[in-house]
Image: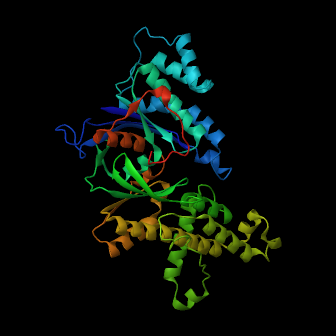
């Protein structure tokens, strides 16, 4: 079985093609351990586009997705060996072109791209199309959904709607190996229920995973997501977008310097102590808005005599010494990670969890990995903690295809009429 997966939830346009054996886990021909081969993968990042504005602009993201999605589809099909020239008399006539235009809301670049695709190439050997329907930026989501509608309508291929967050769950539950120049994924044999810590620019959630496709959200952020907080703190101290990796780099530099300092030198190093919001709240919810505000007030107090009271955030960041930026980055990361780790361990204890999986862009944070693995091993040494491959931590279409295959392995394919697909920017993983 081959699945063409589409991801356009935010600022990454992704198309991938995965091949595996279909069927339920108890089938002689299909088990959770059967390998899935990544035949083709095409990804276009918009980071450079949005970096100049310090964050993602939905309208710009939508246009960029619309420009890239057809070329990326062709590139993924070509890499997978499924792209065949159309040697029949097929022509995308005016009626078909009008259908495509109607589905794509008259996005000229998408319309002309799809017409050329169908005129030039035959229907590929694809069994399903998997597409992200939420959560995410709705204008961006609609581009991928409309592409799925067009491909499904013209090529008569059924569609599987995928929750973006389920994709992040699954990426940590597979093992990646390289076989004959292809990446191969194998679902690990794991004991359910699992606990998933999902951390990204838009989400911070603790999810009790009863099986693939069956999720119970036991905690979530009440305001900013942790990745969003990283980006905002980065702007406060004058770091470029995306801010998470930059903040972590400075925090690591500070820890390294502090560790190398003599006792006398350590006394002279300026450090900061920031609050750990909701760390003792007795539930599994999070809040990072107050932590972000604490960083802001700390900066203002530091520079109020340096730059006219510190009213300008740009001037305030510029007035910070490099050592102060490092110390602030470290204090913020310490506080944010401390809350994430503490609540995750508390949930493991309450629900008797044997496996924790971490997904989302912030799962690539090395300090989070170090702290969660070390502290879990100290309190619950038998608990397995899994993180995705670094390149799978950020948004991509591979995770959407993997999530679709996970549903297939559970006997829960749940295809639907492509024309009924809708974008839901606030889609919950419980739905």
Image height of 17 relative to 388, above or below:
above
| Residue 381 figure quarter | bottom left
Q: Nearer the viewer, residue 322 or 111?
A: 111
Q: Where in the figure is residue 168, as x and y percent of width and height?
A: 43, 50
Q: Where in the figure is residue 427, as x and y percent of width and height?
A: 51, 45
Q: Where in the figure is residue 279, as x and y percent of width and height?
A: 51, 72
Instruction: Give the number of callouts.
Output: 0
Locate the C terminus and report the quarter of the image it occupies. top left
Whether residue 57 sits left or right of residue 18 in the image: it is: right
Image height of 187 relative to 195, above or below:
above
Whether residue 209 sits left or right of residue 145 in the image: it is: left
Q: Residue at x 39, y 54 (%)?
A: 389
| Residue 130 figure quarter | top left
Q: Residue at x 25, y 36 (%)?
A: 23
Image height of 410 relative to 293, above or below:
above
Q: Residue at x 28, y 37 (%)?
A: 20
Q: Nearer the viewer, residue 182 or 223?
A: 223
| Residue 371 figure quarter | bottom left
Look at the image and tell me whether residue 101 can be seen.
Answer: yes
Q: Nearer the viewer, residue 178 or 398?
A: 398
Whether residue 425 sits left or right of residue 346 in the image: it is: right
Q: Nearer the viewer, residue 313 or 292?
A: 292
Q: Residue at x 36, y 32 (%)?
A: 80
Whether residue 57 sits left or right of residue 330 in the image: it is: right
Q: In the orientation shown, which residue stands out farthest toward the top?
A: 89
Look at the image and tell me whether residue 320 can be seen.
Answer: no
Q: In the orientation shown, which residue stands out farthest toward the bottom?
A: 264
Locate the N terminus and report the quarter of the image it occupies. top left
Specify the color scheme. rainbow
């Amino acid at each position: 079985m081959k699945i063409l997966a589409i991801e356009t939830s935010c600022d990454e346009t992704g198309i991938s093609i995965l091949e595996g054996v279909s069927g339920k886990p108890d089938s002689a021909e299909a088990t959770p351990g059967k390998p899935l081969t990544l035949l083709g993968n095409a990804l276009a990042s918009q980071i450079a586009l949005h970096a100049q504005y310090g964050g993602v602009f939905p309208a710009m993201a939508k246009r960029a997705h619309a420009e890239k999605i057809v070329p990326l589809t062709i590139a993924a099909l070509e890499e997978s060996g499924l792209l065949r020239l159309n040697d029949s008399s097929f022509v995308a006539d005016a009626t078909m072109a009008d259908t495509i235009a109607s589905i794509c809301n008259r996005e000229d670049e998408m319309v002309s791209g799809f017409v050329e695709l169908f005129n030039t190439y035959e229907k590929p050997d694809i069994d399903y199309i998997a597409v992200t329907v939420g959560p995410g930026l709705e204008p961006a989501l609609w581009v991928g959904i409309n592409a799925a509608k067009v491909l499904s309508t013209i090529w008569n291929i059924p569609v599987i709607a995928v929750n973006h967050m389920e994709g992040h769950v699954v990426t940590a539950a597979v093992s990646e190996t390289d076989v004959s120049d292809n990446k191969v994924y194998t679902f690990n044999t794991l004991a359910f229920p699992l606990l998933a810590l999902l951390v990204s620019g838009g989400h911070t959630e603790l999810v009790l995973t009863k099986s693939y496709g069956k999720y119970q959200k036991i905690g979530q952020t009440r305001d900013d997501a942790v990745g969003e907080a990283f980006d905002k703190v980065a702007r406060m101290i004058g770091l470029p977008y995306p801010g998470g990796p930059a903040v972590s780099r400075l925090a690591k530099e500070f820890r390294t310097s502090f560790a190398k300092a003599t006792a006398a030198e350590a006394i002279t190093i300026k450090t900061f102590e920031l609050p750990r919001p909701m760390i003792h709240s007795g539930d599994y919810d999070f809040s990072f808005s107050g932590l972000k505000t604490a960083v802001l007030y700390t900066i203002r107090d530091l520079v109020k005599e340096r730059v006219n009271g510190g009213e300008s955030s740009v001037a305030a960041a510029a007035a910070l010494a490099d050592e102060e930026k490092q110390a602030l980055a470290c204090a913020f990361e310490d506080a944010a990670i401390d809350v994430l780790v503490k609540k995750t361990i508390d949930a493991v204890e309450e629900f008797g969890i044997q496996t924790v999986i971490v997904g989302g862009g912030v799962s690539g944070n090395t300090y989070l990995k170090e702290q969660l693995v070390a502290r879990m091993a100290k309190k619950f040494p038998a608990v397995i903690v899994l993180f995705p491959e670094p390149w799978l931590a950020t948004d991509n279409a591979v995770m959407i295809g993997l999530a679709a295959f996970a549903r297939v392995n559970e006997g829960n394919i749940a295809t639907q009429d492509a024309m009924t697909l809708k974008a839901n920017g606030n889609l919950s993983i419980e739905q």
